[in-house]
């Protein structure tokens, strides 16, 4: 059976293990049900997630013209400290920016390849941690807007990483950390504007991913170059599909590609 559609990041359900769904316009796949099955992924065309045109994808699933125009791709998306909606100041679209920025945000610690600090909207917990392939995570600050979360993350980045090593994450070379101790250790570095929002008492969230076999030397699939790939699915972690021959495919970084998937 063949399914066709434009790639967007897999939707997930917090369960034991995590349940993953690849959603197309008129169909969806429960990816967990494809474990140990041979699947073929074929590139068909581009489809920008904003304009829908068959134009090369520039970043984040958008063509170049859309990327530099729409609010969904503005700098504050990747750098929350640049948010200005709380000042009633427009970047690209104030109505959209208020909708996204002026809602509760979480500053968290997550352990995927190492302990890292990150920011997400409260409504995206624990989805954000699942997407990053974190096996454990904890909230440390809950603030009322994206700007406060951003400046808190910037302050903490001087004392803890803000990056994930995707190869280490996929090889499952992980060390359990006491994130409660990390939270207490980092408390002193929270900016004054956000100190009142520190979460005094909570526990780690643990996540279990559907992986039969982890790769020893993961190699990333470039679907645009290969055009087509066939392999046996052995696991899903973060937004990666893991195959028996140690090939891995990052769904998130291939958003905007219109593909065919044969099972």
Image (cartoon, rainbow, N blue to C red):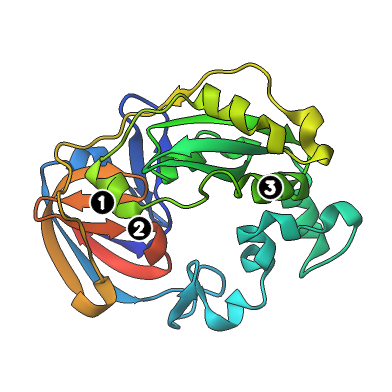
Mark 1–mark 2 contact, CB under 8 Å?
Answer: yes
Badge 3 element:
helix
Vertical position of residue 195 compared to residue 27: above or below: above
Q: For residue 199, which numbered disc appears in the image?
A: none
The residue that label 1 is drawn on is 241
**Residue 251 badge:** 2
The residue drawn where x is 70% and y is 50% is 150
Tag 1 secondary structure: strand
| x 70%, y 38%: residue | 189
Q: CA distance from mark 1 to mark 2?
A: 8 Å
Q: Residue 102: image x %, image y %?
A: 79, 46
Q: Earlier in the sequence, mark 2 or mark 3?
A: 3
Q: What quarter of the picture does the N terminus occupy?
A: bottom left
Give the left or right position of residue 106, taking residue 244 as reference.
right
The residue closer to the viewer here, 229 or 160, is 160
* Identity of the residue drawn at 59% across and 83% down: 65
Name the residue carrying label 3: 155
- Name the N-terminal-most of marks 1 and 2: 1
């Amino acid at each position: 059976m063949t399914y066709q559609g434009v790639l967007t990041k897999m939707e997930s359900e917090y369960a034991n293990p995590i349940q993953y769904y690849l959603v197309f316009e008129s169909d969806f796949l429960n990816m967990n049900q494809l474990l140990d099955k041979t699947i073929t992924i074929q590139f068909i065309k581009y489809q920008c997630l904003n304009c829908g045109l068959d134009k090369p994808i520039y970043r984040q699933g958008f063509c170049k013209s859309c990327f530099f125009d729409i609010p969904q791709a503005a700098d504050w998306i990747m750098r929350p400290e640049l948010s200005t909606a709380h000042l009633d100041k427009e970047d690209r679209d104030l109505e959209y920016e208020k909708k996204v920025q002026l809602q509760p945000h979480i500053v968290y610690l997550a352990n995927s390849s190492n302990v890292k600090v990150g920011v997400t909207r409260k409504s995206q917990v624990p989805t954000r941690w699942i997407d990053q392939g974190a096996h454990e995570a904890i909230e440390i600050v809950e603030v009322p807007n994206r700007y406060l979360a951003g400046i808190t993350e910037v302050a903490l980045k001087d004392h803890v990483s803000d990056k994930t090593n995707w190869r280490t994450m996929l090889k499952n070379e992980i060390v359990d950390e006491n994130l409660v101790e990390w939270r207490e250790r980092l408390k002193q570095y929270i900016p004054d504007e956000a100190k009142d929002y520190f979460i005094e008492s909570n526990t780690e969230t643990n996540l279990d991913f559907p992986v039969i076999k982890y790769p020893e030397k993961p190699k990333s699939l470039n679907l645009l170059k290969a055009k087509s790939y066939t392999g046996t699915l052995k696991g899903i972690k973060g937004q990666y599909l893991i195959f028996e021959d140690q090939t891995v495919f990052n769904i998130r970084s291939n958003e905007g590609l219109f593909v065919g998937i044969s099972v």
